[in-house]
Amino acid sequence: MAANPKGGNQFYKRNDHNRLLSNLGSVPEGKHTMTKSRKRMIGAAAGAGLCAIARLLVVIGYCFYLTHWGSQTGKSSELTIYWFALISALIGIPIGALAGRTCEPSLGAVIGGALSGGTCFGLFVLPGEFMLALVENSESKSAEVWEIFFAFVPMVFAGAWAGGIGAAIGRNAGSVSKAGH
């Protein structure tokens, strides 16, 4: 403990300072205050988890549609579907984290939707369209273009939903107090 030139020690002086701030109302005594960085961390974790789950479900649903009713009936193994779903979920983790970190639900929804749609467009829609350009049958092209479009739109909504909910969780983190406090 360092000695204070006016007498006493440094530790005692620090405790007096905290007690003074507590009495002035800037730090309520006995109340837990949550910092903005902790709220951002909670929003990022919630957004990451929600976006990963949402993207996983979109891919599984879309692949299930393609292999049972769509143009790819019976042409894909279940293992391939699970790999695509896992990759999409892994891509959703940083997307949801970035969107949920904002702690502003509307901004989180916009960022989540844009990033989720952008990755889906760049990794799925564009390569799919380039591959369809190589196919000569024009009837199958139009059907497959719509199938690609119907994979893109739910991916945008999944990112927007996860980003908005994650940001709302981050914004409201710490606002619920314990009973009796």
Image (cartoon, rainbow, N blue to C red):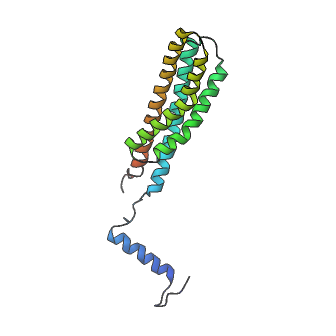
Camera-nearest residue between 100 and 111:
111
Q: Position of residue 74 (x, y in %)?
A: 62, 11
Side (left or right) of 111 relative to 69: left
Side (left or right) of 24 relative to 61: left
At a point 47% along the width and 56% down the height, the residue shown is 37
Judge whether residue 162 can be spotted in this image.
no
At a point 39% along the width and 73% down the height, the residue shown is 19
Q: Quadrant of residue 22?
A: bottom left
Quadrant position of the N terminus in the picture = bottom right
Judge whether residue 110 can be spotted in this image.
yes
Task: Residue lying at the far bottom in this picture: please name it.
Answer: 6
Q: Position of residue 135 (x, y in %)?
A: 60, 14
Q: How many marks?
A: 0
At a point 48% along the width and 54% down the height, the residue shown is 38
At a point 45% along the width and 52% down the height, the residue shown is 39
Quadrant position of the C terminus in the picture = bottom left
15 vs 64: above or below: below
Q: Position of residue 177 (x, y in %)?
A: 38, 52
181 vs 82: above or below: below
Task: Residue lying at the far left in this picture: please name it.
Answer: 24
Q: Quadrant of residue 140?
A: top right
Q: Position of residue 13 (x, y in %)?
A: 45, 80
